[in-house]
Image (cartoon, helix red, strand yellow):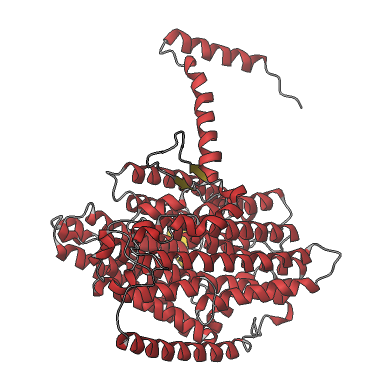
Amino acid sequence: MTSHELVLCGAALSALSGLPALLLSARSSIGQTVAALLNVLGCCVGAMGVVTFYTCGPVAPLTMPAPIPGIDVTVVMDGLSAFFLVPVLLVCGLASIYGLQYWPQKDGVPNARRVSFFLGLMTAAMVVLVVAGDGLLFLFGWELMAMSALFLVATEDHIAETRKAAWLYIAASHFSTLSAFGIFALLYSQTGSFAFSTIPESTSTAAVLMAVLGLFGFGIKAGLMPMHVWLPGAHAAAPSHVSAVMSGVMIKMGVYGIFRTASFFPEIPLSWGLITLAVGTISAVLGIAFAISQRDIKRLLAYSSIENIGIIVMGLGLALIGRATGHFEWMMLGICGSLLHVWNHALFKSLLFFVAGSVIHSMETRELDVMGGLSRRMPLTATCFVVGAVAICGLPPLNGFVSELMIYVGLFRTIHADTTSLAPAAAFAAPALALVGALAAACFVKVYGIVFLGAARSEQAAHAHESGFAMTSPMLVLAASCVVIGVAPVLLAPLLNQAAMTWAAADASAMGDAAPLQLVNYAPLVPISIIAAILIGLLTVGTIVLLRRVRLAPSGPTWDCGYAAPSARMQYSSSSFAQWIVDLFAWALRPVRHLPKIDTLFPADTPFESHVDDTVLEQGLNPLTRCLTWLFGLSRFLQQGSLQAYLLYILIVVVGLMLWRPTG
């Protein structure tokens, strides 16, 4: 079988995987187990297709008739689509295994059969979307993915907050779909076909509209600021293994859409690259600033996803600047760093959502301030969180460091550009990326300290327990993947080169004479691999020595700073830990504080509360929606329910048309 056929067979298995769960009893563990195994099998078959592509090379596109007469749809596997398929198949397969214990059907958790069915369907939709070679098949996969995710977000639809998050998600998704329709309609107007191809020129009005719609429409799905409003609520409302899929791979479909749209243009204006870089930088900085202010562990991870999508788009912006100015090295450092971060984020963010799910499964709450001291009771979960946190902060020796390093190097190279253009301005994104790394470190130090260190802050935390094998094994696989890429990033060089060549193929002038050569010199990654291996070895030895000393040391209470009777309430809370950073970004976060009112000499206990809402949603979109609702409400008087009134409206329109005289 060819790579196309294997991938499509895998997608079919995943799409049908949820049927056993639907056909059997609502409390049948057999149905859920069979559904998970079928989805895993579908992902494995799809992975065989990817391996076949990389080992045997690309094959001719597969063309099939579409439901619309006279139109065909095309399945194409190229370097870019194969690269995006890998995290989709890995994360979705692991999520199915994880869900067996996290969302067990036998225990009567709400809508477990729905979760099994739509998780498999969303897996198939993303596979079809990525291998689509034309706009029609892409839109089919895109909308199927959007609707599947809607039912997954609304799993606990008896909760009002969940229903609100689901409606907001589907509204944003429809805006994204409408933009995608516009892109492919404009592509058809330029090329006469819905097939993915290069348009004649990049300076036409249609090309500019395609670029705007691509950044806006696909940016909504990716969660770029300020188009991110659906993302925090949806990720928090969905089951944790679904949140891992949504954050790890589903929002990457928006990134894939931006990448694919950029490949339609034969040349890139410099302004497009600078705008893309600016949008990515803003998303990265504000995304992590909002993350550190959250008290809900899943909302915190959701905002952190916005930050990492910003880093990916920063790499793409650098690549576009390189294409626009003819600097081949910038382009390849940007695109390869961006593509590698797609993989890296899929690994460590899915890992962190799995860890969050493990904590929530044991604690039955998402609130950080009622956790604490969990590293003693959930040591494996705590260790996996450390791996994910180090990786997401871009620290060596794990995978996040490698991709961010490539983007750093590319941004610093722009300093030496011709000063007659605006290209050197891209270098200002480098300190912003450094700021993002520092804020990410503060954010995840806060989470680890509040959740896993200190004393238990509640009865739930005091009686927490480690999760079972079905939940911990996917976490270990992802943690090991983060370590392997961090230690040996050079192993991914051929895959990155092939994906980069596919993306850059539209711009022959940028490729120049380097097309048959290796696009990026990965020799500098070899010493990085050696250093990473040494660091991991030292950390392993140090951890073993420390554990032995801890095991032999006498046990006793934590130092109490001189207090006679310390309590868990004396520990830092989530809000107090982040207060100085929240105050630093108060101009964007707009924190809300409900201060106690003291009006007597001996006041009673009064509450104090502070929280950070989504500024764009609460102070931008919601007021605009209320204003539009009021304006549209003014037109209700036109609909009187009177036949005479409607005939009068028709008469007015007809008379107006008779009096109208078109010019020319």
Of residues 247 and 591, the one nearer the viewer is 591
| Image position, residue 247 (x, y; %) | 44, 61
Name above or below for residue 103 compared with residue 474: above
Q: Could you tell whether 468 is left or right of 654 in the image?
A: left
Q: Is residue 17 in sight in this rendering?
A: no
The quadrant of the picture occupied by the C terminus is top right
Q: Residue furthest right?
A: 420
| Image position, residue 286 (x, y; %) | 58, 56
Name above or below for residue 207 compared with residue 475: above
Q: Residue at x 30, y 74 (%)?
A: 376
Q: Residue at x 70, y 48 (%)?
A: 205
| Image position, residue 159 (x, y; %) | 30, 44
The image quadrant of residue 558 is: bottom left
Q: Could you tell whether 479 is left or right of 590 in the image?
A: left
The quadrant of the picture occupied by the N terminus is bottom left
The image quadrant of residue 557 is: bottom left
**How many marks overall?**
0
Name above or below for residue 144 compared with residue 620: below
Q: Is residue 539 in sight in this rendering?
A: yes
| Image position, residue 564 (x, y; %) | 35, 65
Q: Could you tell whether 269 is left or right of 302 in the image?
A: right
Of residues 486 and 440, the one nearer the viewer is 440
Q: Residue at x 31, y 70 (%)?
A: 42
